[in-house]
Image: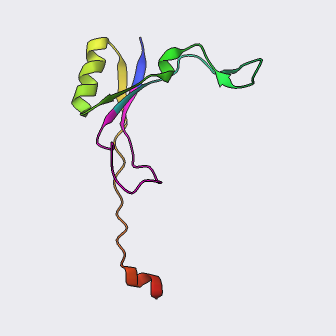
């Protein structure tokens, strides 16, 4: 049976907006250990499910898909937003 995790994408440190952070992602966990390629030395495996990422608008939609397809999932809770409120005048103290 396949195993996966469902999580909500956090805001990237390089972006100011919150675009696509409301979507939920289902990501499969790799069943094989990664091994270096003899020619290039890059790490890889034969498990192609580890390359697959599915986006869903809600957590319930992702859980319904996993239940329908027989995928064992665990949900990673969304990180709590930390607001750093400061005034422009604080730069000159």
Q: Residue furthest right?
A: 39
- Name the chief secondary structure element in magenta: loop
At x 38% / y 80%, what residue is drawn? 88
Q: Is residue 32 left or right of residue 61?
A: right
Quarter location, residue 34: top right
Residue 43 in magenta stretch: no
Q: Position of residue 42 (x, y in %)?
A: 70, 26
Which image quarter is the N terminus in? top left
At x 36% / y 60%, what residue is drawn? 82
At x 37% / y 67%, what residue is drawn? 84
Quarter location, residue 37: top right
Q: Residue furthest bottom?
A: 93
Relative to 12, say whether 59 is above or below. Answer: above
At x 31% / y 12%, what residue is drawn? 69
Q: Position of residue 44 (x, y in %)?
A: 63, 21
Q: Is residue 12 left or right of residue 69?
A: right
Report the number of numbered marks. Answer: 0
Relative to 36, say whether 70 is above or below. Answer: above
Residue 10 in magenta stretch: yes
Q: Position of residue 22 (x, y in %)?
A: 28, 42
Q: Which residues are magenta?
A: 5-24
User: Is residue 38 or residue 2 the one in the foreground?
Assistant: 38
Quarter location, residue 76: top left
Q: Is residue 57 left or right of residue 86?
A: left
């Amino acid at each position: 049976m396949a195993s996966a995790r469902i999580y909500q994408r956090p805001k990237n440190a390089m972006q100011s907006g919150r675009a696509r952070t409301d979507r939920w992602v289902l990501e499969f966990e790799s069943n094989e250990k990664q091994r270096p390629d003899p020619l290039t030395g890059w790490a890889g495996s034969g498990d192609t499910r580890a390359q697959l990422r599915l986006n869903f608008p809600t957590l319930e939609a992702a859980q319904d898909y996993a239940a329908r397809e027989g995928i064992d999932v665990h949900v990673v809770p969304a990180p709590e937003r930390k607001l750093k409120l400061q005034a422009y005048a604080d730069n000159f103290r």
